[in-house]
């Protein structure tokens, strides 16, 4: 079992500790990907194809990582993606994750597939910024009752997951879900149920449902799982408040592009008409910086937050956020940017840009060879 007294310097350290601490089934579930896992790997690797363009000789003695998300002030542009079964990873469960996020004044999205009632999370961590993730459930009367519950508990936005249509991806990797779990935050709660009890509730979701949601609640609606400029344009036309670029960490459809590669097209389609967020493959502060430079208002972390939780509960989540924040601050200072809103596309470029600048091999052989 991993010792929390050892020194943790990056997200990978937390991943290794989480692996040591967790039951193999739980770790396998966290790491699971759809089919070959190409999208999962590319989410991480694509960040490495960008290069920074530092600007020097500026006063960077004070770095400010604060920003706003849907009008809420947060200290860092890094939030926690919704993820399921936190009680399986640490006894503190989602309350640990929520208090780790709140300690950093960061945003957390609570997954519907969690074992602590959403009201209890709010009572235990009243000062946290929280949005609620939701799947579309039919009949709509059940969905409406659920939305009212989320509103009453003070959640500040609904994040509709759109990339798990009728859970068509259930055949991904051979892991096992917990045999019995209290699914207390789904529209039709099930105590001591199996995952099938939840899968049965999740319906296919259409633009018509998005219109319906926009009509029945004043909470901002954010669509999680957008990957194309076409859907981003439609999202804006349907009045959504946020477009969340995500491929579910490569756990749903394998073969889509990395989220960081999809971001720029989405940003150009949205043209500032709503906020854009991104998750998938963020493993250090430079990745955060790259996504912000390309137009994300904030980024979210899925597995890294779970590694923190599994390592040391709430403190582990806070530590992961601290490491990412320190790395972001250093990247900002060393590229000459002091505020999050000033991180612009001019600070990043694809590595291929530099390769294209060089003379051809024949030319270089002649002159430098
Ligand atoms: C263990 C696990 C459980 C997840 N559960 C949910 C969920 O309940 N709802 C959801 O919308 N996304 C879920 N996701 C996807 C994350 O919200 C997020 O999109 C993804 O993890 C981001 O990629 P990253 O892990 O590389 O940061 C889950 C991801 C993981 C790893
Ligand atoms: C319907 C229960 C399945 C939980 C799925 C959680 C999830 O999205 C994941 O990626 O895992």
Image: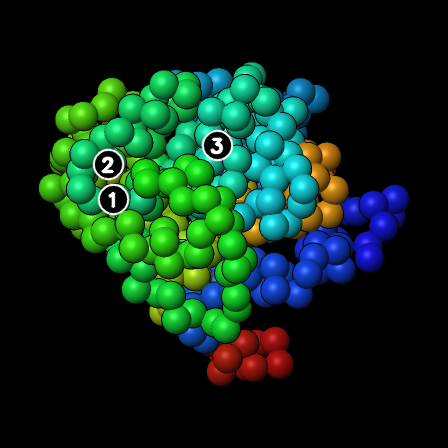
Q: Is residue 111 left or right of residue 282?
A: left
> Which of disc 3 and disc 1 is earlier in sequence?
3
Residue tagged by mark 3?
Answer: 117
**Can residue 354 be seen here?**
no
Q: Is residue 173 left or right of residue 96?
A: left
Q: Which mark is residue 137?
A: 1
Q: Residue at x 57, y 51 (%)?
A: 303
Question: Picture coordinates of residue 144 (x, y %)?
Answer: 23, 30
**Can residue 15 be seen here?**
yes
Question: Picture coordinates of residue 76 (x, y %)?
Answer: 56, 28
> Which of disc 3 and disc 2 is earlier in sequence?
3
> Which of disc 2 and disc 1 is earlier in sequence?
1
Label 2 CA crowd tier, 10 Å (few <14, some 14–19, many 20+)? some
Asked which secondary structure carries label 3, the reply is loop
Picture quarter with the C terminus: bottom right
Q: Is residue 126 left or right of residue 200?
A: right
Cβ atoms at labels 1 and 3 below 8 Å apart: no
Q: Nearer the viewer, mark 1 or mark 2?
A: 2
The answer to whether residue 360 is above or below residue 46 is below
Question: Picture coordinates of residue 296 (x, y %)?
Answer: 41, 38
Q: Residue at x 44, y 56 (%)?
A: 194
Which quadrant contains ligand 2? bottom left
Label 3 CA crowd tier, 10 Å (few <14, some 14–19, many 20+)? some
Residue tagged by mark 2?
Answer: 142
């Amino acid at each position: 079992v991993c010792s929390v007294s050892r020194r943790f310097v990056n997200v990978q350290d937390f991943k290794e500790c989480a692996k040591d601490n967790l039951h193999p089934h739980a770790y396998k579930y966290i790491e699971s990907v759809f089919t070959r896992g190409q999208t999962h790997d590319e989410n991480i690797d694509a960040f490495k194809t960008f290069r920074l363009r530092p600007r020097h000789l500026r006063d960077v003695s004070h770095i400010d990582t604060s920003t706003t998300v849907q009008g809420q002030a947060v200290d860092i542009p890094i939030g926690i993606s919704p993820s399921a079964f936190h009680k399986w990873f640490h006894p503190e469960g989602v309350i640990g994750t929520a208090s780790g996020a709140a300690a950093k004044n960061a945003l957390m999205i609570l997954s519907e597939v969690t074992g602590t009632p959403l009201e209890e999370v709010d009572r235990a961590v009243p000062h946290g910024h929280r949005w609620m993730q939701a799947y579309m459930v039919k009949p709509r009367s059940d969905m409406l009752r659920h939305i009212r519950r989320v509103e009453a508990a003070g959640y500040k936005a609904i994040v509709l997951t759109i990339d798990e249509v009728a859970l068509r991806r259930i055949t991904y990797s051979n892991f096992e879900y917990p045999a019995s779990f209290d699914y207390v935050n789904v529209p039709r709660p099930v105590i001591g149920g199996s995952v099938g009890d939840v899968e049965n509730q999740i319906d296919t979701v259409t633009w018509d449902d998005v219109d319906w949601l926009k009509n029945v609640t004043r909470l901002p609606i954010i669509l999680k799982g957008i990957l194309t400029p076409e859907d981003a344009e439609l999202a804006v036309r349907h009045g959504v408040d946020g477009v969340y670029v995500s491929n579910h960490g490569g756990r749903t459809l394998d073969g889509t592009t990395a989220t960081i590669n999809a971001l720029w097209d989405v940003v150009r389609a949205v043209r500032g008409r709503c906020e854009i967020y991104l998750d998938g493959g963020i493993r250090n502060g430079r990745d955060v910086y790259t996504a912000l430079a390309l137009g994300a208002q904030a980024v979210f972390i899925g597995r890294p937050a779970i590694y923190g939780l599994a390592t040391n509960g709430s403190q582990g989540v806070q530590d992961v956020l601290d490491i990412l924040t320190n790395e972001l601050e250093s990247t900002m200072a060393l590229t000459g940017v002091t505020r999050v809103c000033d991180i612009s596309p001019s600070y990043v470029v694809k590595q291929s840009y530099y390769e294209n600048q060089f003379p051809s091999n024949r030319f270089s052989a002649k002159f430098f060879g």
